[in-house]
């Protein structure tokens, strides 16, 4: 049992990016489900945790609310409230992510998931604020990022055969085209926000692959941001030397500043004259003083 726990811990924190995405999504869902269950059991309020999670983690369609909760543009793509919802998204992410990592690497896969989620979220907000038939609401789910990974794989390897339910074999591009077509046909359905997000993720995948083929790697920008945040949060603080005496130790140690003598600035005119003399008559033509000066300057460089 302990070895299983250690293996899960290793995969969650040090596994490839696909494994970490799966663990993160599942962990957030389990935390939500367990919190909702215990809160409902002891308070009788079945809507407390869902309302709180929807308020803090879900992406609002109202731009004003988004300005107050900018983090939701990232948190929504790791949040699920229903079992079937997360099950479908994780299946799509696992299989499409495995294929994409094999051919394009895990960094591009992670970048597609994040950029696709952001692109899907932004398209959702835009359309919900300009369409007369879509009202205000909020959205959760990893589907925009998952579809972005799937469509990118289909764009990069369109003729790759894939099996649906282990029975039907079709080309990869057919699967992606079928999903995108269904999203377009359901733009005015009950889950319009989810289908809009899918289309946003697909659009991001298209431009991501096109830019990659032109030599522009979008994933580089993502990892520059990740590295900057990591360095800011986990950079070790340099210890400053204390002045005076240290107390509470076996011996008192006095820390003193060591002053380094300033280097003498070289005489440019004199140096040029010596170099010109070497060029015209050779090194042996220099006097002892000139040779000593040249030796001194060379040791100070």
Image (cartoon, rainbow, N blue to C red):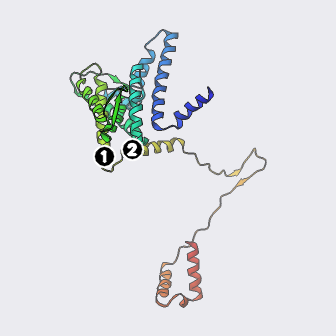
Quadrant of the frame with the C terminus: bottom right
Residue matched to label 1: 211
Looking at the image, which residue sits at the far right?
A: 250
Above or below for 100 versus 75: below
Q: Nearer the viewer, residue 77 or 249?
A: 77
Where is residue 236 shown, x and y percent of the image?
57, 45
**Label located before the other in sequence (1 or 2):** 1
Q: Are marks 1 and 2 in contact (CB under 8 Å)?
A: no
* Location of residue 95 by image quarter: top left
Which residue is drawn at the image coordinates 45% and 15% (left, top)?
48
Which residue is drawn at the image coordinates 32% and 35% (left, top)?
151
Whether residue 205 is visible: yes
Looking at the image, which residue sits at the far top?
A: 44
Quadrant of the frame with the N terminus: top right
Above or below for 211 versus 264: above
Residue matched to label 2: 219
Where is residue 271 shown, x and y percent of the image?
50, 81
* Location of residue 107 by image quarter: top left
Helix, strand, or loop for circle 2? helix
Q: Is disc 2 surrounded by few (<14), some (14 to 19) or many (20+) residues within 10 Å? A: some
Q: Nearer the viewer, residue 249 or 110?
A: 110
Which residue is drawn at the image coordinates 75% and 44% (left, top)?
248
Which residue is drawn at the image coordinates 56% and 85% (left, top)?
290
Q: Is residue 296 left or right of residue 58?
A: right
Whether residue 124 is visible: no
Q: Which mark is residue 2?
A: none
Where is residue 79 shown, x and y percent of the image?
42, 26
Work out how far the residue at label 1 is from the one at label 2, CA to CA, in angstroms: 11 Å
């Amino acid at each position: 049992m302990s070895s299983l726990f250690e293996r899960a811990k290793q995969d969650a924190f040090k596994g490839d990016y696909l494994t970490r995405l799966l663990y993160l999504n599942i962990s957030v869902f389990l935390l939500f489900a367990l919190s909702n269950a215990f809160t409902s059991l002891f308070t009788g309020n079945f809507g407390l945790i869902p309302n709180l999670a929807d308020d803090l983690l879900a992406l609002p369609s109202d731009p004003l609310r988004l300005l107050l909760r900018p983090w939701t543009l990232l948190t929504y793509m790791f949040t699920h409230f229903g079992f079937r919802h997360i099950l479908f998204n994780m299946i799509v992410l696992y299989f499409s992510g495995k294929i994409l990592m094999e051919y394009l690497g895990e960094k591009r896969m992670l970048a597609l998931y994040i950029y696709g989620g952001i692109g899907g979220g932004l398209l959702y907000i835009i359309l919900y604020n300009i369409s007369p038939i879509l009202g205000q609401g909020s959205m959760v789910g990893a589907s925009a990022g998952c579809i972005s990974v799937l469509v990118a794989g289909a764009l990069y390897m369109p003729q790759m055969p894939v099996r649906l339910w282990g029975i039907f074999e079709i080309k990869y591009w057919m699967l992606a085209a079928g999903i995108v077509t269904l999203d377009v046909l359901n733009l005015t359905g009950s889950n319009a926000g989810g289908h809009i997000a899918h289309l946003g993720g697909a659009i991001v995948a298209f431009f991501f692959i096109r830019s990659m083929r032109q030599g522009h790697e979008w994933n580089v920008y993502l990892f520059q941001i990740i590295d900057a945040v990591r360095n800011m949060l986990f950079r070790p603080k340099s210890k400053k030397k204390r002045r005076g005496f240290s107390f509470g130790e076996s011996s008192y140690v006095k820390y003193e500043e060591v002053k380094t003598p300033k280097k003498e600035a070289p005489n440019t005119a004199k140096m040029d004259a010596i170099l010109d003399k070497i060029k015209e008559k050779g090194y042996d033509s220099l006097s002892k003083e000139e040779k000593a000066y040249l030796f001194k300057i060379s040791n100070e460089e």
